[in-house]
Image: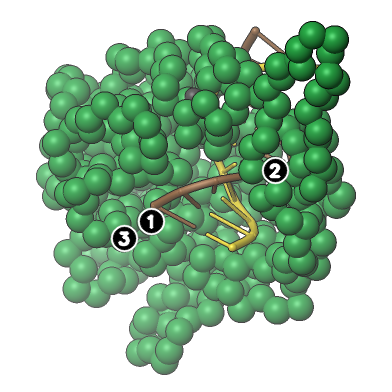
Chain colours: A green, B yellow, C brown
Amino acid sequence: MVNLNPAVHVGPTVGRFCVFPHRNVMQRVPHKVSHIRVCMFWSQAVEGERAADGRRTGRSLEGPERERDHTRSVSLLEQKRKVVSSSIDVPHARKSEEEVDMDKVTAAMVLTSLSTSPLVRSPPVKGTEGLNGWWKDSGGGCFTPSSYSSSGYWSWSGPSDQSNPSTPSPPLSADSFKPFRTPGANGPAPDDAIDDQDGSSLLFDEPIPRKRKNSMKVMFKCLWKNCGKVLSTAAGIQRHIRTIHLGRNWDSDCSDGEEDFYYSEIKLNTDSVADGLSSLSPVSPSVLSPVAPPPRSPPTTPGRSHAHSNTTPLSRSAPSALYLIHSDHAYQVRDTPTKTTSNSNFSISWQSPPVTFTGNALMYPPMSLLSRKSRGEGRKCRKVYGMENRDMWCTACRWKKACQRFTD
DNA sequence: GTTGCCGGGAT
DNA sequence: ATCCCGGCAAC
Ligand SMILES: [Zn+2]
């Protein structure tokens, strides 16, 4: 369509040479209606929730003449959210009673955490919709049994090695799931990485039941006046409070949770292992290792100048971005130098970032606001080659992803 | 206004 | 997996 006949106005002498974009001009035909069915990851039982939305993208040339017609987005978001909550306990099959129960509990917890907007822990999402951002993330992370493998990055792939692509996620989801789980829940699950002793996962009153990074040592401090005892396990501190201060009986059985109010979690930053390489271990190390070998905490991201330096050692995706940048260029059609990083599938944990926040009440605000990622200032393919040579751009640029040719 | 690119949709 | 785009923040 749109023939743009090259403005070959035959000049007096020569036809003016003109480069014009003949890129895949007719690539996207205006097409049909797409039902936006928001199929959440594990529940797609949404019916009646569809919006027909004729959205065509006639893209005839470059930029400015694309047309859009409908506005959705907000309502869409709304919908999604609804989906989540409405189908929150759509279990699959019959289960034993306990399990069903467990599901409910889980569901309840999820709901709870959805509705109580997280106070601190402002994830680096947009200012406007912190909650949404958060919600999205946890959605991906928590609810999917085998979430969305390529969770973070739009392209990842080890050309040759690559264990199967769907593996990476499990630890991930499992991990993020943790907070929402009831201690005994998974029956035989040998879970419990260091950080979550049975007792502690019960405390949801605390704003953030989130995953902890491991360079932190978490302690629990009794807040009872004049006490100030510090124990290393939640169970311990609970017991302490129950017995010493509340005068309850010793066996934990029915902890009505009251003691939760009297202790607080503090984290000691034992961050010493710096080694950057160790982090190559495929999945987020914290989850796998039972003993939480402090993998490393990148307080500052070495590579990219702008980084999203987040003071907390649990910084957001910075580190991963780091190796991603150099290691996965699979999509890169040309200039693919080599593909460093021998193997080790990096499946990046990626989703954890928003989840990170560690502390709770005690956490003083070192700086809740991290600088937003600044734009890399170097010019990129787009600028260099210009719109009209779009097919000289690197693939990433063409896809509006982070440029891989001119990395900063 | 433009540029870089994240998040996510479509295929 | 690949391609594309909406939209946003940084310019
Ligand atoms: Zn590029």
Whole-percent x, y for residue B2 in the image: 72, 16
Q: Quadrant of residue A186?
A: bottom left
Mark 3 or mark 1, earlier in chain? 1
Contact check, label 1 and label 2, Cβ < 8 Å: no
Measure the alpha-carbon separation of dots 3 and 1. 5 Å
Q: Residue beneath label 1, please?
A: A149
For disc 2, the chain is: A
Q: Secondary structure at mark 2?
A: loop
Q: Secondary structure at mark 1?
A: loop
Q: Nearer the viewer, residue A369 or A256?
A: A369
Q: Residue beneath label 2, please?
A: A25
Residue that appears at 66% across and 76% down: A46
Whole-percent x, y for residue A213 in the image: 29, 37
Which corner quadrant holds the C terminus of chain A? top left
Q: Quadrant of residue A81?
A: bottom right
Left or right: A242, with A50 as reference point: left
For disc 3, the chain is: A
Left or right: A294, with A167 as reference point: left
**Is A386 placed above or below A323 here?**
above
Contact check, label 3 and label 2, Cβ < 8 Å: no
Numbered label attached to residue A166: 3
Q: Is mark 1 within 8 Å of ligand 1?
A: no
